[in-house]
Image (cartoon, rainbow, N blue to C red):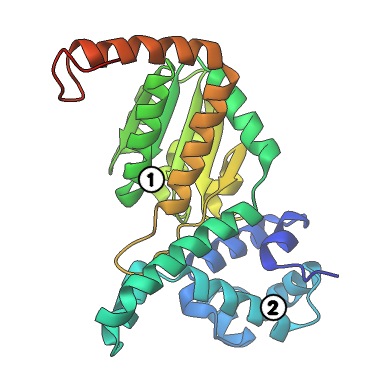
Amino acid sequence: MPKINFYDRIKESTLTKKEEQFVNQLMSNVNKVAFLNGAKMASEFGVSPSLITRFIKKLGYAGFSEFKKDLESIYKKNNTPHDRFEKIIQTKDLKEGIVQSTFAQDLNNLINMQESMDEEAIEKACLQIENAENVYISALFTSEICAHLLSFYLNRLGINNVTFLGIGLSKKVEYCRMTEKDVFIAISSMGYLNEIIEAAKIARSEGSITISITNDNVNVLARTCDLNLVAPGIGTAIDYSQIAPISMINIIANKIAGDRSEEVLENLAKEKESWFKFYAFGVDKSFPR
């Protein structure tokens, strides 16, 4: 029987409000508490040891040791860019190992994404995007790369979209007055940034369908949105990797393009004519089509 991990246990459990708050604190500070004992963990979060004991029992762990092993595993996968880069620059084989370790980590992110892929959620997300009156895309920091790419693809597919990027994006979301006909997409590698979470809450309160692209199914952003698409963003050096999120965006674009293939093919044919007309390939008029 396969081992049930922490994320699956959370999804299958009905948590009290205090337990929900504890999970949020735990995931936001896993790098600080993964290696603490029960008493110190309770002190760190200002909760009673009995709450942690009941929580662990509710999730089905045999005891604190088993729970702690899962936290340590999460820590190893999710520590911050600062932590990762600090460790890398302290290693003797920085120059020799960085190429292969970066490639290996990106490959591992893609493998993890494939293994946890929820095709039904992807289908639902794409359908909502296709039928939306407007699609609003929000992201912060390195995730803004993905927002730009998704916007570019949606423009080519003829889908109205607006991007909200950077600090202050939640206010922009609040002022744009979304409706139930709109879709809001939040892209965040780890899913704990208050700005993105607040924006998703605002969009949902307006009746819009909310979709997140983030690291796992149990972080705050994932549990705030109607649909979550898992794309691990674990980085090797200076920041979170965007390889898996970009792959997820490619999947979304290709799925929507496949659903409206005749329209897309017609538009691409017109685009092809324009390329030749304006010598987009850098060739002369004698170049055969």
Q: Residue at x 47, y 75 (%)?
A: 31
Q: Position of residue 110 (x, y in %)?
A: 52, 56
Q: Is residue 259 above or below residue 138?
A: above
Q: What's the mark number on residue 195?
A: 1
Q: Nearer the viewer, mark 2 or mark 1?
A: 2
Q: What's the mark number on residue 67?
A: 2
Q: Classify mark 1: helix, strand or loop.
A: helix
Dividing the image into 4 quarters, which one contains the N terminus?
A: bottom right
Is residue 180 something one can see in this rendering? no
For badge 1, the amino acid type reads Glu
Q: Quadrant of residue 68?
A: bottom right
Q: Position of residue 164 (x, y in %)?
A: 33, 33
Q: Is residue 282 above or below residue 120?
A: above
Q: Position of residue 146 (x, y in %)?
A: 38, 42
For badge 2, the amino acid type reads Phe
Q: Residue furthest right?
A: 1
Q: Position of residue 277 (x, y in %)?
A: 21, 10
